[in-house]
Amino acid sequence: MALVTTERLEIVPLSDGQMLTLIDIEQDPEMRQAYTEMRELALTHPENRLWYTAWQMRLRGTQEAVGDLCFKGLSPEGIVEIGYGMYPAYEGRGFMTEAVKAMVLWASRQPGVREIQAETDPGNRASQRVLEKAGFRPNGITGAEGPRFTWIK
């Protein structure tokens, strides 16, 4: 099993069964649909499931979940997009920056990865700061969710 660790976190990919549980407990219909699509892609592409499943961020020691992140597949051009969310009770403590930095480093070391991208809501300055602290820079493109950022290997 893949495992990424930081000073305070363990970041682990969810199994297909854990993805079902996540889907079942998710209250936001948009996120439920996103998790459902991610699970279907992980099942359809088992050789690349780490690029489709959700990764749970847990506090080291207690294993308490603080949020999750994911990649949105690996393109033939070597581009992956990272997405992430933090549970409100854990916001503002630097966990997300710590996790994104670690996952970008992990992703950059995987075969075929050339570039990592992210997209944020235009008004979500906290998310943009996470990306900037993790080494991403605006690339001048606006996607469906807002401005895009790029981290190049």
Image (cartoon, helix red, strand yellow):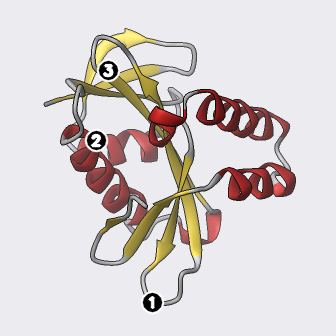
Q: Secondary structure at mark 1?
A: loop
Quadrant housing the C terminus:
top left
Image point 37% across, 65% down: which residue?
Answer: 94
The quadrant holding residue 30 is top right
Which amino acid is tagged 2? Ala
Q: Residue furthest left?
A: 153
Which amino acid is tagged 3? Ile
Q: Which residue is mark 1?
A: 61
Q: Secondary structure at mark 2?
A: helix
Q: Position of residue 11 (x, y in %)?
A: 43, 63
**Mark 1 or mark 2: whose residue is earlier in sequence:** 1
As measured in the structure, the alpha-carbon distance from the residue carrying label 1 to the one carrying label 2 is: 24 Å
Crowding at mark 3 (Cα within 10 Å: few <14, some 14-19, many 20+): some
Q: Is residue 6 visible?
A: yes
Is 17 on the left or on the right of 24, as rendered? left
Crowding at mark 1 (Cα within 10 Å: few <14, some 14-19, many 20+): few
As measured in the structure, the alpha-carbon distance from the residue carrying label 1 to the one carrying label 3 is: 33 Å
Image point 56% across, 21% down: which residue?
Answer: 145
Q: Secondary structure at mark 3?
A: strand
The quadrant holding residue 35 is top right
As measured in the structure, the alpha-carbon distance from the residue carrying label 3 to the one carrying label 2 is: 10 Å
Q: Position of residue 32 (x, y in %)?
A: 79, 40
In this view of the protein, which residue sits in the foreground, 94 or 47?
47
Q: Which residue is mark 2?
A: 107
**Mark 1 or mark 3: whose residue is earlier in sequence:** 1
Q: Which mark is residue 148?
A: none
Q: Is residue 29 above or below residue 73?
A: below
Q: Which residue is mark 3?
A: 79
